């Protein structure tokens, strides 16, 4: 027998002798913060992909998957655990559901449409609208495309596409 470090209940060891918590709830409550959206966020460092990995009773895995299994049940091999809140750190079982990669992508797009990813709204943009206008003005003065490319840190092919309207066509 052991005593839970969180709720002080007495519990019987299930897997090994050094268990410290009687349940998954007590195990996570020591490190969970709840935000304004109701997300349960573990106060630990996420992996590079934004997910949190944890271990509970010899089960190591992504925290949201372990949360789903402990609160709702098993996960079929062909399914993934999706978030209704789009917060990878959230382990609130009310925010988790089973789906496929494609249903998850469709659901995420419906909740947070990124329709306006043109130009400087695109996270990978190297130019802004002012740069594009300046490139087009300078190109009319017949400046060397290689010099323009070096000035803006992009390839001469990209400069040609900006000038010809194949890229940044929405900027006049």
Image (cartoon, rainbow, N blue to C red):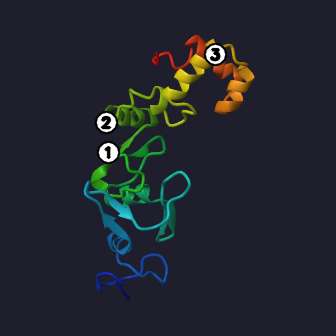
The tag earlier along the polypeptide, 2 or 1, is 1
**In-front residue for pair 42/63:** 42
| Residue 155 seen in this snapshot | no
Tell me which residue sits at (32%, 59%) in the image: 71
- The picture places residue 86, in percent across and down from the top left corner, at 37, 46
Residue pointed to by mark 2 = 111
Q: Residues within 10 Å of mark 3 (few under 14, many from 20)?
A: some
Q: Secondary structure at mark 1?
A: loop
Q: Which mark is residue 84?
A: 1
Q: Are marks 3 and 1 in contact (CB under 8 Å)?
A: no
Residue pointed to by mark 3 = 139
As measured in the structure, the alpha-carbon distance from the residue carrying label 3 to the one carrying label 2 is 41 Å
The tag earlier along the polypeptide, 3 or 1, is 1
Among the 4 quarters of the image, the one containing residue 150: top right
Q: Which mark is residue 17?
A: none
Q: Residue furthest front?
A: 141
163 vs 171, left or right, is: right
Q: Is residue 59 positioned above or below 27 on the image?
A: above
Mark 3 or 2, closer to the camera: 3
Tell me which residue sits at (46%, 15%) in the image: 172
Among the 4 quarters of the image, the one containing residue 42: bottom left
**In-front residue for pair 33/119:** 119
- The picture places residue 103, in percent across and down from the top left corner, at 39, 33
Q: Residues within 10 Å of mark 2 (few under 14, many from 20)?
A: few
Q: Secondary structure at mark 2?
A: helix
Q: Are marks 2 and 1 in contact (CB under 8 Å)?
A: yes
Mark 2 or 1, closer to the camera: 2
As measured in the structure, the alpha-carbon distance from the residue carrying label 3 to the one carrying label 1 is 48 Å
């Amino acid at each position: 027998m052991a005593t839970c470090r969180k709720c002080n209940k007495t519990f019987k060891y299930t897997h090994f002798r050094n268990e410290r918590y009687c349940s998954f709830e007590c195990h996570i409550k020591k490190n969970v913060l709840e935000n304004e959206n109701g997300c349960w966020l573990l106060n630990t460092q996420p992996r590079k992909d934004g997910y949190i990995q944890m271990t509970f009773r010899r089960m190591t895995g992504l925290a949201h998957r372990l949360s789903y299994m402990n609160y709702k049940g098993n996960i079929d091999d062909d399914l993934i655990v999706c978030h209704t809140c789009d917060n990878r750190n959230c382990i609130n079982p009310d925010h988790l559901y089973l789906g496929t990669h494609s249903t998850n992508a469709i659901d995420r797009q419906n909740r947070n449409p990124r329709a306006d990813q043109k130009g400087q709204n695109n996270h990978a943009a190297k130019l802004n609208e002012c740069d594009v206008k300046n490139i087009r003005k300078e190109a009319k003065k017949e400046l060397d495309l290689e010099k323009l490319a070096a000035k803006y840190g992009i390839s001469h092919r990209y400069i040609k596409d900006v000038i010809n309207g194949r890229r940044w066509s929405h900027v006049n």
